[in-house]
Amino acid sequence: MNSIVRHISSLLRQSHRTIEPLNNGSHQLQQLQQCRGIRVKVENGNLERALTLMQRKMQSSGMERMIKQVQRHHIKNSEKRVLAQKDLERKIRSQDLARKLKSILLKKVR
């Protein structure tokens, strides 16, 4: 929970920056969403309920996913190798599928 709070506070600090016009698509939209932030009222001093509401709002808005992507932690070299191998296999499969589809489409055109 502490890491999430730290990331939220860093996002809030970033939200004071000015936002450029929305001409760059989704990246600009994400910046706009960061700037709006999430607000939760603490009613009757019930902090636990406010935290659960905040967590629910974060999950539904996609901010939690964004925070996890931003988190920087050490990745072991063995994990990097495994991830690189999986990326390579995915890329090769995609290229093979594209080649097969291209050959099928060429046969249909003829």
Image: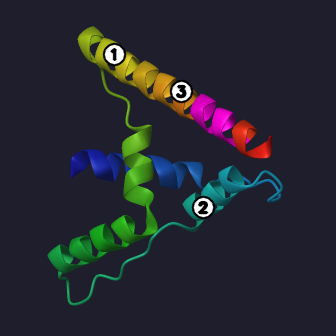
Which residue type carries mark 3? Asp
Based on the picture, tell me whether residue 68 belongs to the magenta stretch: no
Q: Which residues are magenta?
A: 98-105
Amino acid type, label 2 = Cys
Residue at (29, 19) in percent of width and height: 75
For disc 1, the marked residue is: 80
| Label ID, residue 35 | 2
Spatial distance from mark 3 to mark 2, Cα to Cα? 42 Å
Q: Nearer the viewer, mark 3 or mark 1?
A: 3
Q: Earlier in the sequence, mark 3 or mark 1?
A: 1
Looking at marks 3 and 2 on the same chain, the residue that comes earlier in the sequence is marked by: 2
Verify CB contact (< 8 Å) between mark 3 and mark 2.
Answer: no
Q: Are the two marked residues, 2 and 1, in contact with CB atoms closer than 8 angstroms? A: no
Q: Foreground: 42 or 38?
A: 38
Q: Quadrant of residue 18?
A: bottom right
Q: Is residue 81 left or right of residue 23?
A: left
Report the predominant secondary structure element of the magenta stretch.
Answer: helix
